[in-house]
Image (tube, helix red, strand yellow):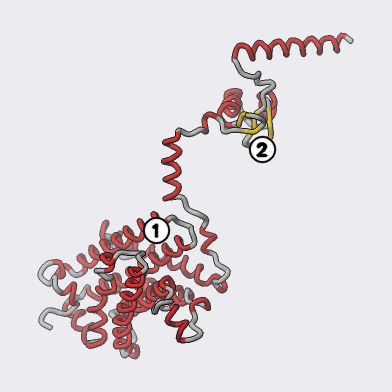
Amino acid sequence: RGASRGCRARSVLRVIANSVDARVTGRPAEEEEKRLNPADGELYTFRQLERWGDRFPMSEAETRFHWERLCSPLVNGKPVAPQSQVQDPEVAERTEQWNKVFKTRSLSHMWSVADAGHVHAISGALYMVLGLAQLLDVSGQVIIGWEAHVPVALATATLFLGAFNAASGMQSALLAKSAEDLFQILGLGPNGNLKSGGFVNTCVFFFILSYQAVRVLPSFPAFLQPLDSLIGLLAFLATMHTAAILNGWVNKQAIHRVDTVLLPPLLNLPVAWHLLMDGQTWVEELSARYPGWPEAFFMANSTLAWSASMVTFVLSLHERRVVSLEMRNGIMLGFPFIVFAIICARVGSLIPEWFQDDVWTIFTLSAPGN
């Protein structure tokens, strides 16, 4: 009985203390107010939270901070955000705008069941890493002046991997069943699919740039030299196809006409012309005149091929809602300029004459006097 009376007395004193606390602080006593603990999703009073915190190395100050700043109070029986998590309206608006531009989704959206054996995704990831290593190596040669760390054999193997990746991207969904399907896939005609047409065009130019890159190497097989005319003609046709695709986007008012004034493939026309008309003679003349030309040309074309592949990858990221339109546009505008600047700097170190007396050779790729 004495123990029972003692318990009742302590209960009375606790109620009185709680009432005093409520009158002094103007809020419900912590012993009775319950909040939602974000750690486990359960409701606790402060005293219960203290006992919960005993399982962890939490000091009293840490428990107090957890209760006041992290646990959600209840309003009409529903948890609301703690005061510490309530953002200023302007801050919330800026945060929303930032997330709209820079927030990304999981790359798992790029893992498609339509990709047989996921060969396109896997080969693309490997090519992206190896190509980036080559780009960083070239950047180091330009900025720091170090010797090349990526051998030509590895860079050539990387090109073959990229070619396999480009070919694997044109699987059953892009295979034509009839002439009408072929024109639609190429993005030609009134019903042409401009997206697939652009993808095919990029893949074709990847093969063209890859061939041109290895063509100037001394180790290029002589029995493949007759392909020069075919590749040169294909480059002209691919440039015309690029113009047709861009014109289709202009007609759909997706881009402005002024954006198509300078076609990047136009820069490849001198190479296509020399392969079509001169072949091995052109390679030998430029190599004799500029000893650093084979290395520079191989580096430039292999880097451009990788850059084109990365632009296509970014387009795919946006197509599958992994990145925002603003991020896509920013990468597509900024990344090629960075790559182009690195290429120009490296070419300038290998063939300084092109930036002194033989500037015109940059555009014609013809040895002076020819």
Viewed as shown, does residue 48 lie left or right of 340? right
Q: x, y (%) of residue 348?
A: 20, 66
Q: Nearer the viewer, residue 235 or 217?
A: 235
Q: Amino acid at mark 1?
A: Arg
The answer to whether residue 160 shows anywhere in this view is: no
- Between the C-alphas of marks 2 and 1, the distance is 39 Å
Within 10 Å of disc 1 (Cα), the crowding (few <14, some 14-19, many 20+) is: many
Marks 2 and 1: which is nearer the front?
1
Q: x, y (%) of residue 49?
A: 67, 27
Quarter of the figure with the C terminus: bottom left
From the viewer's perspective, is residue 153 above or below residue 314?
below
Q: Which residue is mark 1?
A: 328
Which residue does the image show at 52% across and 33% down from the upper left?
A: 85
Viewed as shown, does residue 171 lie left or right of 128? right
Q: Nearer the viewer, residue 254 or 39?
A: 254
Q: Amino acid at mark 2?
A: Asp
Q: Which mark is residue 40?
A: 2
Viewed as shown, does residue 59 lie left or right of 9? left
SS of the residue under disc 1:
helix
Chain-order first, disc 2 or disc 1: 2
Which residue does the image show at 34% across and 70% down from the upper left?
A: 251
Within 10 Å of disc 2 (Cα), the crowding (few <14, some 14-19, many 20+) is: few
Pointer 2 with pointer 1, Cβ within 8 A: no
Q: x, y (%) of residue 145?
A: 26, 59
Quarter of the figure with the N terminus: top right
Q: Nearer the viewer, residue 50 or 42?
A: 42
Q: In the figure, residue 293 lies in which quadrant?
A: bottom left
